Amino acid sequence: MPTLSPLLRRRLWIAAAALLSIAVAALSVWIMLLDRQVRQRFAGARWALPAQVYAAPLEVYPGGPLDRNAFRRELERLGYRAARTLEGPGTFTVGASRIEVVVRPFRFWDGAQPARQLDLGFQDQQIARVTDVAARQDLALVRLDPMLIGSIYPTQGEDRVLVKLDEVPPLLAQGLVLVEDHHFHEHFGLDPKAIARATWANLRAGRAVQGGSTITQQLVRNFFLTLERTWSRKFTEIFMSVLLEAHYSKNEILEAYLNEVHLGQDGGRAVHGFGLASQFYFNKPLAELQPQEIALLVALVKGPSFYNPRKHADRARERRDLVLRMFFEAHLLTPDQLTLATKMPLGVAGEKGGGVARYPAFVDLVKRQLRGQYPEADLTHQGLRIFTTLDPRAQELLERHLLAGLPSLEKGYHMKAGTLESAGVVASVEGGEVLALVGGRDVRYAGFNRALDARRPIGSLAKPFVFLAALMQPDRYDLTTPLEDEPIELELPNGDVWAPNNYDKEIHGTEPLYDALAQSHNLATVRLGLDLGVNNVREMFRAAGTLSDPPPNPSLFLGAWDLAPLEVAQLYSTLAAAGYQTPLLAIREVATQDGSPLTRYPLRVRQTLPESPVYLLNWALERVMHEGTAATAYNILAPELRVAGKTGTTDDLRDSWFAGYGQDRVVVVWLGRDDNQPANLTGAQGALQIWAPLVRDLRVKSFAPVQPANVEFAPGCGGQLAIPYVEGHAPPQYPECAGLKSLFHW
């Protein structure tokens, strides 16, 4: 082998030294860039925080319409835990006619409410007293912390609820370190022993069976890097871990890990951090978790999909119990605590949604009402707090009755299971607040929202606005004005002939105006509408609050106009409020992450319809309920309950509607098929059969409109029924009954 000359050896050494210098310089620059990236990203706002969406808080006050059992259900809905003795916020005890509870602290839009111990007494199906135990003082009103119902996050985005290390239960912080990185407090970002142990185990198994990553490495991997498995990524991870440990304390790293770790998936939303995971799986704050619940969350770190407790309960329980035994062996649990914890069920809230993202249709409405007011980046990155109008009890009842009613109707009318779809809206009359909203029979599915987007013909729901246009002219029309329910044909601009029929295919002759509405007769309605003019009827819809343009065709009189259920609720809420229009809102307040108020959504009310004609129309809509097309509702409702409403049925029985109200609530229900094939249900056969029990269970207040000063009552035919008239327009004597076919139904 030839020997290198001294000159050549010298040149090679110089070249090697130069290459080494270049490599060291490049490595140094690379490390400096990594160091800068670590410090900049970790020192600033570490996460984009989606806006958090809250339901309306439950207001507790003497006289409130909740008995002991109902109030207990509300506490359990919020994730409060029954105990033998009070154990701090989120716990309650139950007595024969009382409940003691420690309410959680919460920062509302108008200030912070501290945790406090309350003693509530119940009597006669309502709250009798509310006492602050510490202050020994009776209270007029207390709000419970509102339910977190969703977040506004980017598509395929991350969601989290930030927590501070001092807010985390000690068992969680200690147990997490024990299970995931036993030497966390001793190493410098890498654990050589763990790496060697994992390498040996993997070599023996011939595959990856054990990991040696520290908590710091896991944080770096999730926080800074992609999920690709390459040697360069692993090399970067090692250096970043050491740099992170050099700049930040163990507590800062652990706190970041607690907020970053991936713990589940909810559709397109990734659940990150223990703060959100506590809500997602157990519907309560992290501070209130019990040992078995903490152990389950720690168990999920190993594989949130593999150990998903909603899909793989046995697997999750086995892993949870293993973690509990590790806690015990490390003296973090006593023998009694271990025994009790391993006997407990998984206790996961709900089947799919848990404590968040459980009302996707309502949250969809919230997002739409926020559009144009806040940039998308603010809603998905700034951690805003959105306080909404959703009433969880009303929402639960709406869901329950739709989910129970659809299969019952399908079975009763011999339909294939899953044929019917549905949507429903519950709103307050006085405040114009959307209290509950369902967009389909799969109430947890964040897909097509029929309450907002299923624009279907409204059928006979349009008729009250035709009759209202008539009652706006008291010189020409009153509730007893005879109408002719006779055949009619109209030639359309395209040469076709429109010849409507009544649903029963019968001709009813002459009948009083209010009865034509109560019986929903098409021919009388069309004749009345033509006499009034289509533009007058269109103006009634506009005054009632529609944002859509009613079609300028006579078919509008019979509801040949496509609207979504929420738009129908807007129209009928104006009737329920005596002609005062209030835009339906789903939002009360928007606050910053720290609770400072940003935007208020005050009540906006304006009178758009005169009270007297609306009062007369509402009287007629009560007749719909008693002797008209909706009379079967009183097979379910108490006879003394006054409600007003209207059935809606469309051509070929494709759509079944009911819209109605009491004094405090407007409720709209739609049933139909997504393929627009006939559902073969009238409004009374379908939607009304869900509406009536829902109104009963909502405990809607009896309709009691204030009689306008210029409205007077006069006896009708035979004096058996007092009928309202605009003052000065009542007939001088009883209407003539003789010769009028079916004029009065008394």
Image (tube, rainbow, N blue to C red):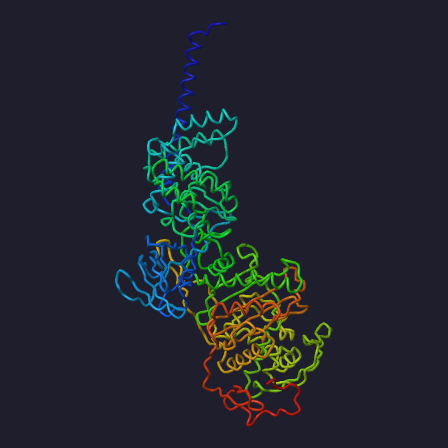
Task: Farthest residue to the left: give it.
Answer: 135
Q: Please state the horizontal and vertical placement of residue 249, each as a whole percent of the image.
A: 32, 37
The front one of 427 and 442 is: 442
Q: Is residue 454 above or below residue 717?
A: above
Is residue 438 in sight in this rendering?
yes
Q: Quadrant of residue 516?
A: bottom right
Q: Is residue 558 left or right of residue 180?
A: right
Whole-percent x, y for residue 579 in the image: 49, 77
Left or right placement of residue 515 versus residue 386 in this view: right
Query: Looking at the image, is 326 positioned above or below residue 437?
Result: above
Q: Residue drawn at (49%, 88%), measured in percent from left and top?
A: 712
- 136 or 139, which is in the foreground? 136
- Quarter holding the C terminus is bottom right
Between 12 and 674, the one lying in front of the other is 674
Q: Is residue 166 left or right of residue 445?
A: left
464 in relation to 40, above or below: below
x and y, in percent, of residue 710 in the image: 47, 87
Q: Quadrant of residue 179?
A: top left
Q: How many marks?
A: 0
Residue 680 lies, in percent from the top left, at: 66, 66
Residue 561 position by quadrant: bottom right
Which residue sits furthest bottom? Answer: 732
Viewer can see residue 33: no
